[in-house]
Image (tube, rainbow, N blue to C red):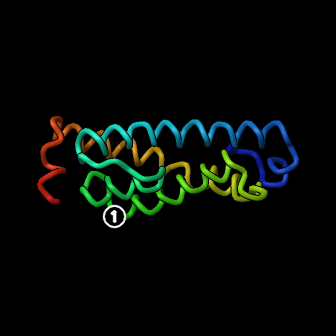
Amino acid sequence: MASQPREVFLQDEILLSGAKYQLIVAIEAAQAICNHLAARVAKEAPQSYADCFRILGRKGILSRELTPRLVDMAKFRNLLVHGYGKVDDAAVHEIIQKDIADLINYVREITLFLKADPEGTKANEGS
């Protein structure tokens, strides 16, 4: 999917639909982890998908570089799910090409946090 040239990707409705669905699934999986950490470790209840990543950023669980990128990804997920206007299919291709690594980096940062602080006690110290 990611290796498809932009023009081929944009003309293939099945590929495009599959990509959108997989983005939703991946972002929602990241969100589920985020919600758990926000509640259990940060002791905060997010007001939105995007707010959850902000909480983890404030608590130092996520890096300052990655946090706004995940906030944007959460907002894009809302566009995909709720269809606020027409989703720009070219943006879907661009995210797959350039931004999908943010989800991999998210898993890395969460893993590092959990290895360094398995009980989640350090995240609450900075508040």
> Residue 6: horizontal and vertical position, in percent?
78, 54
Badge 1 local density, few (<14 within 10 Å), some, or many (20+)? few
Please give the name of the residue rendered at 76% of the width and 59% of the height, measured from the top-left corner: 85
Question: Please, which residue is most extreme toward the right here?
Answer: 11
Secondary structure category for the residue under label 1: loop
- Three-letter amino acid code at the position of disc 1: Arg
> Residue 24: horizontal and vertical position, in percent?
61, 41
Q: Identify the image quadrant of the N terminus.
A: top right
Q: Nearer the viewer, residue 39 or 77?
A: 39
Please give the name of the residue rendered at 66% of the width and 53% of the height, measured from the top-left corner: 79
Residue 9 position (above or below residue 32): below
Please state if 7 lies on the left or on the right of 108 as rendered. right
Residue 112 position (above or below residue 90): above
Quarter of image, res 65: bottom left
The residue carrying mark 1 is: 64
Please give the name of the residue rendered at 70% of the width and 41% of the height, measured from the top-left corner: 19
Please give the name of the residue rendered at 68% of the width and 48% of the height, measured from the top-left corner: 82
Quarter of image, res 59: bottom left
Please state if 127 lies on the left or on the right of 54 as rendered. left
> Residue 42: horizontal and vertical position, in percent?
24, 48
> Residue 86: horizontal and vertical position, in percent?
78, 57
Q: Identify the image quadrant of the C terminus.
A: bottom left
Please state if 52 lies on the left or on the right of 125 as rendered. right
Q: Nearer the viewer, residue 1 or 119?
A: 119
Give the mark count: 1
